Amino acid sequence: MSPQDVFSDLVGQDEPVRILRRAAAAAARTMAGDPDPGGMTHAWIFTGPPGARRAVAARAFAAALQCERDGIGCGECHGCHTTMVGTHADVHVVATEGLSIGVKETRMLVLRSASAPSGSRWQVVIVEDADRLGERASNALLKAIEEPSPRTVFLLCTPSVHPDDIMVTIRSRCRLVSMIQPSAAALSEFLVRRHGMVPEQAGWAAAAAQGDLERARQLAADPESRGRRDEVLGVPRRLTNIGACFEAATKLEAATKLEAASAVADLDVAERSALERALGAGGTGRGATSAMRGAAGQLKELERNQKARATRAQRDAIDRALQDLVGFYRDVLVTSMRAPVAMVHGDLAAVTSAAAEKWAPESTLRRLEAVLACRDSIDRNVKPQVALEAMMVTLWRG
């Protein structure tokens, strides 16, 4: 089997990959007229922490289902290639850049899933952010999962199977694939082997990224990402009084907003320009003028979508910063307890040791819990500035 098969990017996921390979092989036997219901089912949920690459696993499984070589996921045939690059006619991906997946979009997806595959294999529906389905959207999807078409497979990606993330009735009708956070050693080895990184650089980036492959790549290759990390990890030393707490919260909120705006700016301009051209901008005559006057609603809808995307981009940026802080306070606790485990931020060993001498373990734990509580608050739509201010005060007081 090719070392670059569709599952080769799933670092440290041996058990999930074994399950998915077995299911894809069973699906291939089903197509050949020899059903194996014990290995394959029509609905799956992929769970796991940030960086576990749930969506990558779902897409790899979709490719294996469409693989023309008995479902091995060779990575070379037409079915595998088109699925992995996103052009397969029978693989539909729903990935929101906003805060939620709407019922209208879900109903369109359900309608599409009811049709027979245009090829000879499976109709596959991947929902990358199933935890962002609203109640009405979840109900629409549930009906499709309860009454699936014979050749349709649903692949849902969500952080957990907690009711806050996925409807209980949907969970009960799906097979669970639990992704894990890959170890720093496995991630480092992958970065060296696949991306040709120097072992020392790969080891540092893998540890600092806390199991997130894309984050590790960023830290290793992008000086701006390293600079933002350094700025965040300097926060604990700057919290010397209540004023410094509010200042730190304001700076972090502003920095993440700027990072998010920069990330989506080019796409926003391109989208608006494309829509205006489609609506007749730059044209002459009465028809073009009338068309642009009637386009106000579509432009407002685009602006709403772009605003939602910017909000999510900022929340993602804040979450990366908070994850770095989680690693720092975890390192302080590990140092205090003399636990025989590797550090996340090994380059800050001196700072970590100084903090461990200054703070009692109970105080460090309260700080760690404050960061986790801030992440939870923002996830529950608390205004980021408010959540960050509350966290900073607890980090100062301990």
Image (spheres, rainbow, N blue to C red):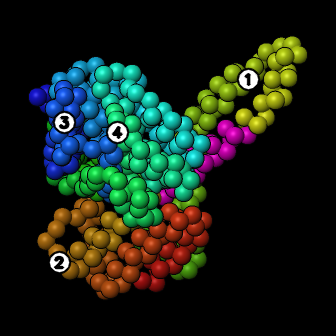
The tag earlier along the polypeptide, 4 or 1, is: 4
Label placed on residue 279: 1
Chief secondary structure of the magenta portion: helix
Residue 169: image location, x then y, percent: 41, 59
SS type, badge 1 = loop
Q: Which residue is mark 2?
A: 338
Compare residues 83 and 351 and report the one nearer the observer. 83
Residue that extends furthest to the right in the rendered view of this protein = 286
Q: Earlier in the sequence, mark 4 or mark 2?
A: 4
Viewer-nearest of discs 1 and 3: 3
Q: Which residues are magenta?
A: 300-318
Q: Amino acid at mark 2?
A: Arg
The amino acid beneath tag 1 is: Leu
Residue located beneath label 3 in the image: 35
> In the image, 164: left or right of 2?
right
Q: Secondary structure at mark 3?
A: loop
Amino acid type at mark 3: Pro
Outermost residue, left direction?
A: 1
